[in-house]
Amino acid sequence: MIPTTPIQSMLQIAILIAVPTLAAADDGYWPNGKAFCVSLTYDDGLPSHIDHAVPQLNAANLKGTFFSPGGATYRWSQDDVEQVRAGGHELAGHTIKHPCARKFDWVKPGNALEDYDDDRMAKELDENLANLVANGVQREIATFAYPCGSTYIGEDKHTYVPLVKERFFAARTTKPGLDIPPSETVDLFDVKTLAGHERDLKYQLDQVTDARAKQGWLVFMFHGVGGDHLAISAEDHQEILRALQEDDSVWVATFQEAAAWVKSKQEVVNTTTTEPLSPESLSPESLSPGE
């Protein structure tokens, strides 16, 4: 794959989000005067996502991001995939075989991160991306989550982040924390997260409060919802959604939507002009040959 240039990247963003809204409300960083952003992400394409997460998201009129390994029907039926798409949720990448470190006893022989080289990982990422595209994802804005949060492959444990950057728009880790784009530059291929199954509901809601106070981008990471592994109860998950639904100060965005917003703001900061971007300024005719 040929990496996009900064200008191409900006053109893609202009298509993704309404360019006239790139200049957020005067009273804050986030769009439409929102104080902070929350993204709800779900790993591994689990049955409980179909049984509980998607129906609860739909009922709350909120959108989530589903990072699925293998084909889109890895653990779902094609009907399940269509149900996710119909709800306006994001389908996103998570490799094919979900490789993790050899030290975990559930990792199958030959499928550990240490067993991979660049060629094998590149082919797997390409297959994962092709599956997403076949299920309606726009290639240029597909996002990714590193299985087990690990970004290395091979016995020498070298990084495969460059392979991800060549193929995906942004990537989420499992590093705990809160990104605060208004006051720091966010590495969109190293986005931090909050594990939804850890600790209790009060702790989870306290992190939402902290994100609001800091105008941050809080990315929840859920696995099982009311079942499967690393599960949060369906009741606690629903309570988090209820709290977000009732908070007028939060922008609940898919991982891709939030990443596109952050990237657009970073690009604006890096330009030499202080004028808001317009469709005309991003048109191919306006670009000099050197760009």
Image (tube, rainbow, N blue to C red):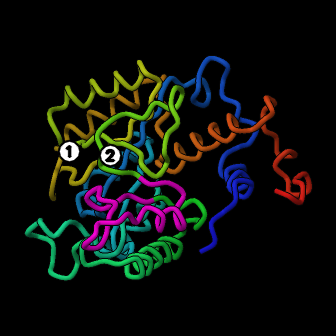
Residue annotated with mark 1: 234
- Based on the displayed image, in which of its 4 quarters is residue 40 positioned? top left
Label 1 secondary element: helix
| Residue 59 appears left or right of 183 | left
Query: Does 257 appear in magenta?
Result: no
Spot occupied by residue 149 in the image (x, y as percentages of width and height) = 29, 55
Which residue is label 2 attached to?
56
Vertical comparison of 183 with 41: above or below: above
Kindly report the distance in space between the C-alpha atoms of the residues bearing marks 1 and 2.
Answer: 9 Å
Q: Which amino acid, mark 2? A: Gln
Q: Which tag, 1 or 2, sits closer to the chain's start?
A: 2
- Residue at (25%, 31%) from the top-left corner? 204
Give the residue type at disc 1: Ala
> Tags 1 and 2 in contact by the CB under 8 Å rule?
yes
Q: Nearer the viewer, residue 35 or 58?
A: 35
Residue 99, compared with residue 211, is above or below; it is: below
Which contiguous range is marked in magenta?
144-171
Q: Which quadrant would residue 264 be assigned to in this image?
A: top right
The label shown at residue 49 is none
